[in-house]
Image (spheres, helix red, strand yellow):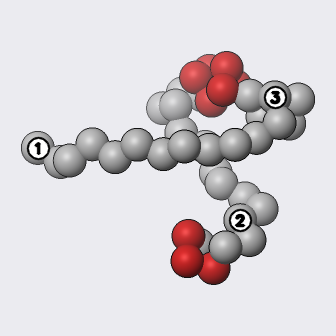
Amino acid sequence: MAERRYWLFKSEPTAYSFADLQAEEDQTAEWDGVRNYQVR
């Protein structure tokens, strides 16, 4: 079984809230606007 990985993300609730993420079909979403090269 694959190891679980957790991510902490920060977003303004008016832009994309945690409730929006939970409402996604697979509870996943594209991560855009990343400025740190290491996480791209």
The image quarter in which residue 6 lies: top left
Q: Of label 1 and label 2, which has the lower sequence position?
A: 1
Label 3 amino acid? Answer: Pro
Q: Secondary structure at mark 3?
A: loop
Q: Which residue is labeled 2 in the image?
A: 34
Residue 17: x percent and y percent?
74, 28
Q: Do tag 2 and tag 3 residues touch (Cβ < 8 Å)?
A: no
- Would you place residue 20 above or below residue 10 in this image? above
Measure how far apart labels 1 and 2 are at the Cα level: 30 Å
Q: Which residue is labeled 3 in the image?
A: 13
Quarter of the image where the C terminus is located: bottom right
Label 1 amino acid? Answer: Met
Q: Dot 3: few (<14), some (14–19), or many (≥20) neighbours within 10 Å? A: few
Label 2 amino acid? Answer: Val
Q: Is residue 30 left or right of residue 26?
A: right
Along the viewing direction, whichever of 30 and 39 lies nearer the viewer: 39
Residue 29: x percent and y percent?
61, 43
Q: Which residue is labeled 1 in the image?
A: 1
Q: Residue furthest left?
A: 1
